[in-house]
Image (spheres, rainbow, N blue to C red):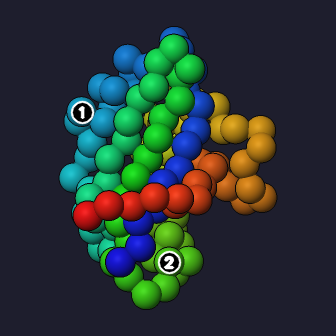
Amino acid sequence: MERMGMVIGIKPEKIADYKQLHAECWPEILQSLSDANIKNYSIFLREPENLLFGYWEYHGSDFEADMKSISDQEVTHRWWDLCTPCQEPLEIRGEGEHWAMMESVFYHD
């Protein structure tokens, strides 16, 4: 299992929309995450900085293939069409990243 954290900005005027979307997350989206070995997924909001912090635990053995399985689904693209206008990717994110991945520097179980 690998713990993974990521960060992205959120447009202040879209915070309520983003919260509502995730309060009513589609079952197909949740299933695709489970099918891709993603567990214990949380998104946190930090205001007034307007940052979203995502955390999940990856339980698979081929992260790239599992992420491709999510991105290949039509339902994912419909979901992203709603979520993406709410988000502001960080300028200093890695190449090919939408959410900027973060380094784990401490863990206590």
Instruction: Report the residue at 59% width, 48% height from top.
Output: 99
- Estimate the x, y position of residue 71 in percent, counting from the top left: 51, 64
Q: CA distance from mark 2 to mark 1?
A: 26 Å
On the image, numbered disc 1 is attached to which residue?
23
Classify 10 Å Cα crowding around label 1: few (below 14), some (14-19), many (20 and above). Answer: few
In the image, residue 93 sits, relative to residue 46, either above or below, namely: below
Please indicate whether residue 52 sits to the left or right of residue 56 in the image: right
Say which of 16 and 58 sits in front.
Answer: 58
The image quadrant that residue 20 belongs to is top left
The numbered disc on residue 5 is none
- Identify the secondary structure beneath mark 1: helix
Counting from the top left corner in percent of width and height, residue 81 is at 52, 40
Circle 2 or circle 1, nearest the eye: 2
> Is 61 or 16 nearer to us in this picture?
61
In the image, residue 83 sits, relative to residue 2, either above or below, namely: above
Q: Secondary structure at mark 2?
A: helix
Task: Check disc 2 and report the residue beneath it.
Answer: 63
In the rendered structure, the answer to whether residue 33 lies left or right of residue 94 reads: left
Would residue 79 be found to the left or right of residue 89 on screen?
left
